[in-house]
Structures are given as C-alpha cells and as structure tokens.
Amino acid sequence: MSNVARVAVLVSGRGSNLQALLDAAADPWFPADIVRVVANVPGVFALERAAQAGVPTSTVVSKGRAREDFEAEVLAQLGEVDIVCLAGFMRVLTGAFLDRFPSRVMNIHPALLPAFPGAHGIRDARAYGTTVAGATCHLVDNGVDTGPILAQGGVPVLDDDTDESLAARVLAIEHRLYPMCLRWMAEGRVTVEGRRAKVKLLPGETRWLGG
Ligand code: GAR
C-alpha cells in the first residue's frame, strides 16, 4: 500500500455511511482516498453524494444477473484499489471476489455481531427485545456478516423506540465507527489472526464506542 490507500466504496442506497467516509477523506491528513464508488442499483442517492464530492462513479446492475458476471464487471470498474468498503451494499460477495482483496474488504452492519446478521439488524434486535443495540465494523469473509470484528459501538434500546428511532441512533454510531476503522486499515494497523482482528491502538483510541 502506498502512503495514501486507494479505496473503493460499494453502495446500494442512500449512502450516509459513504458520506461519513467522504467527509473523513476530505481531510488532507486522512490516510485514504476514495477513488471510486460503485452502485448495484441505478439512481441511488449515494451516487449523487459521490458526484458532489468529485468521486467517479459506476453503476453495475446486479438484479437478475449471475453473481460471477456482476462481480467481474465490478472488478473491472474498481481497477487498482487497496481497500474495498461496503457501505449499505446489500449483496453477498463471492469468495472469488474477496480473494482479490485478502482481509481488505470492510463492512458496516447495524447490529452487535454476531447477533442479528443479515439485512434487518435493527428490526431483528427490537423484535428479540434486547436492551442494547449497536453497530459493528468488520472485515468481510465468506459468510454473511461473520468476518473479524474491527470495532463496535452500542446504544440503549428505549421502550418507546421504533425501528426508525433506533436506526437513527445506531446510524450515528456507524458514522463514527467506519472512518475510524478505515483509518486503522489504511495506516496498516490491523492484523488478522484466525477469527480475530488485532489493532495497534494509539493513546485514547478504543474499539468500543458507547452511546
Ligand atoms: C446502514 O445502516 C448499514 O449498516 C446497513 O444499511 C444501512 C445503509 O445506510 N447495512 C446492512 O444492513 C448490511 N447488512 P446508508 O446507505 O445510509 O449507509
């Protein structure tokens, strides 16, 4: 990896996590540049956010296509990148794709993994009746939301929460976690031993954000 890591972000929707990464990367001291945003759904707001920030975008439609075809086209659009960030990207990537970026594909998930993986982390946590919810930033492996955990953060679940109100508080945690973890990755401070990610923390840094 050169001094400044080249990062691609894959998105499927409104892109608020993408925005958090773009905002962080706008700081000239941030150790990563976002060089490409790829959406698998046409016209999503995340594409507008990227364009606003002057980042090149591509749309590669996934619906109704074989995963291999879709991923081959995404890879072609990515070009040379060091790190791939999934930010509200609602597709599972194959092992063949992940092998191109070993331990360098990151994801943000709106639950305290390993609880509530999948597409409905917030709804599932509320339905289960947990008193704490949160977000996890992790590396992506062949499973669904199962890769080594980089950092997590939590918020209380309130009696009068709706899915929307809880999601909003969890999202605020996501927006703090993701740039922090991308910094660690870009600075080469993350190593992986089996299931566990290890991070060389600087004074004052923490892998748990309370809320
Ligand atoms: C975020 O809450 C993210 O954690 C979640 O989708 C939302 C996307 O919001 N991802 C997943 O559930 C992946 N399993 P955003 O487009 O505003 O970043």
Image (cartoon, rainbow, N blue to C red):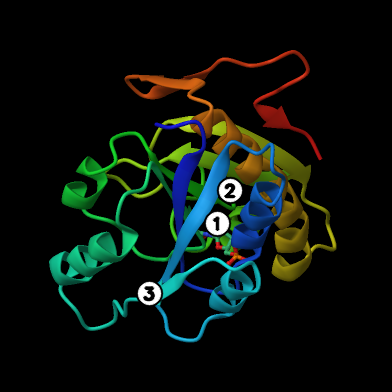
Question: Where in the figure is residue 119, as x and y percent of width and height?
Answer: 46, 63
Q: Which amino acid lies under the numbered mark 1 shown in the image of this protein?
A: Gly
3 or 1: mark nearer the eye: 3
Disc 1: residue Cβ within 8 A of ligand 1's nearest atom: yes
The secondary element bearing badge 3 is classed as loop
Q: Earlier in the sequence, mark 2 or mark 1?
A: 2
Q: Which residue is mark 1?
A: 121
Q: Earlier in the sequence, mark 3 or mark 1?
A: 3
Q: Which mark is residue 111?
A: 2
Asked whether 69 or 157 is in front, the reply is: 69
Q: Earlier in the sequence, mark 2 or mark 3?
A: 3
The secondary element bearing badge 2 is classed as loop
* Residues tagged 2 and 1 counted as in contact (Cβ below 8 A): yes
Give the quarter of the image for residue 79.
bottom left
The secondary element bearing badge 1 is classed as helix
Give the quarter of the image for residue 161.
bottom right
Disc 3: residue Cβ within 8 A of ligand 1's nearest atom: no
Question: Where in the figure is residue 138, as x and y percent of width and height?
Answer: 48, 38
> Taking the image as four quarters, which one is ligand 1 found in?
bottom right
